[in-house]
Image (tube, helix red, strand yellow):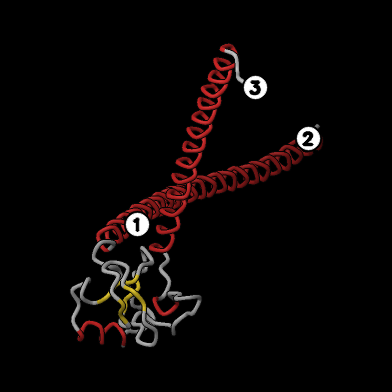
Amino acid sequence: RGLSTDQVVTTGGDTEANKNHHERHDSKSKKGTKSRERSNEKSSKIEKLKKILSPKSTSEKHQSANDVKPAAGKHKPSIQHKCDRCEVPNSNLLGCEFCDLWFCNSCENLDENDLALLNASTNGTHWYCHECEPQVRFILEQAKSGIVNVAKSVAHSLESIKKNQSQTNRNVESVSTKVKNLQDLYNNVILKIDTLNDSVNEINLEKGAVEKSLKEVA
């Protein structure tokens, strides 16, 4: 059965409304996706900062290939992987501790001697690709600057404490001197009182003798 003109218009209006609804939904989905991407990017930067400030040994890094992990170490001769920059299969790859990507010696402009040196390095050695190295250097310099500022602040606080302690010691010495002077003054007063008592006793004795003599004369 055919559709009337009103039905056709209504159907067209419904289609347009559905289209607008889907566009708004897609717009919200894109905004939500971008928000999650920004949040994930921020979390990733924070994790990278933690990694640089407390870097893990490169011997602990692993790269998976079909869920197979190679032996520990920067230099991976046992399993063949693709370089994350040129994507050429290579069994001699170096793992950057900052971006967690793996690179061949050609992309990093390293010769065999460099590879041998890195391969023979101790667990305390860390390696970063040429793109990440400036960022790592900047972060480490900022961290070093922060540590230096904290050390200066602590040293200033300690110096202030020493000065306050010295002033306190001087105040204690001054109070001790004043207490000693008061004690000496008290002792002198007691001595004078004792002397005065002796004089009073002598006067009383002399007075008694005079009174006795006067009675005898009378």
- Dot 1: what SS? helix
| Label 3 sits on residue | 1
State the mark number for residue 217. 2
Secondary structure under the numbered disc 3 in the rendered image: loop
Residue 81 position in % (x across, y down): 36, 77
Picture layout, residue 1 above or below residue 150: above
Percent position of residue 17, x then y = 54, 22
Name the quadrant of the N terminus. Answer: top right
Amino acid under label 3? Answer: Arg
Q: Which residue is mark 1?
A: 143
- Please name whichever residue, 91 or 46, is drawn nearer the observer in this view of the structure: 91
Q: From mark 3 to mark 1, how far is it between C-alphas? A: 78 Å
Check the image and report above or below for 40 versus 98: above
Q: Position of residue 114 (x, y in %)?
A: 22, 82
Query: Are discs 2 and 1 less than 8 Å apart at CB?
Result: no
User: In x, y percent, where is residue 95?
Assistant: 35, 73
Name the residue at 44% across, 60% down. Answer: 50
In which image quadrant can residue 115 be found? bottom left
Mark nearer the viewer, 2 or 3? 3
Of the residues shown, which amino acid type is indicated by label 2? Val
Crowd around label 2: few <14 · some 14–19 · many ≥20 (10 Å): few
Q: Nearer the viewer, residue 85 or 58?
A: 85
Residue at 56 percent of width and 12 percent of height? 5
Q: Earlier in the sequence, mark 2 or mark 1?
A: 1
